[in-house]
Amino acid sequence: MDMHFANMRSLIQILDSEMYDLMDSNGDYTHFYFCYRWFLLDFKRELVYDDVFATWEVIWAAKHIASGHFVLFLALALLETYRDIILSNSMDFTDVIKFFNEMAERHNAHSILQLSRSLVLQLQTIIENK
């Protein structure tokens, strides 16, 4: 689990430095403990029942196609989906936990999965261009 948190920190530093800076400056919640439930339950509480299975299938398939760490991109996509809300309200650790608790089962799984895929491609492009 600690490796997931460390990898999330690296991903967000690379793909969204503005969000990372906010997290670092607002009480430093770059430990990403608010993602704990997401990783522990494979997003089971974040999505409605029918979307959970589709999401799990994508995670399992991604291990063979795109990345064995697709759950990280899924978590980042959840953050990026609500990026403007988090940044405009300058949310701290407690605000983020509360926000995602209130948003449980209200996420658009299809758009989050699409964003996850594009985040994988974005990182792959960055790596290829170095």
Image: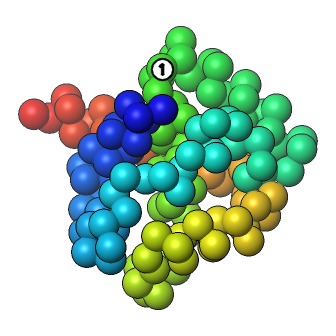
Q: Provide the residue designation for mark 1.
A: 68
| Color scheme of the displayed model | rainbow
Q: Position of residue 90 (x, y in %)?
A: 41, 84
Which residue lies at the image location 64% right of the left edge and 65% below the top edge? 100
Q: Residue placed at 64% from the left, 36% from the top?
A: 40
The relative height of residue 87 versus residue 8 in the rendered view (above or below) is below
Which residue is drawn at the image coordinates 65% and 54% (left, top)? 111
Horizontally, residue 23 falls left or right of residue 130, namely: right
Residue 104 in picture, x, y percent from top left:
76, 61
Q: Is residue 65 left or right of residue 113?
A: left
Mark 1 Cα-neighbour bin, 10 Å: few <14, some 14–19, many ≥20:
few
Quadrant in which residue 61 is drawn: top right
Could you tell me if residue 52 is visible in this image?
yes
Quarter that holds the C terminus? top left
Residue 130 against residue 107 in the figure, above or below: above
Task: Tell me if I can see residue 114 in this picture.
Answer: no
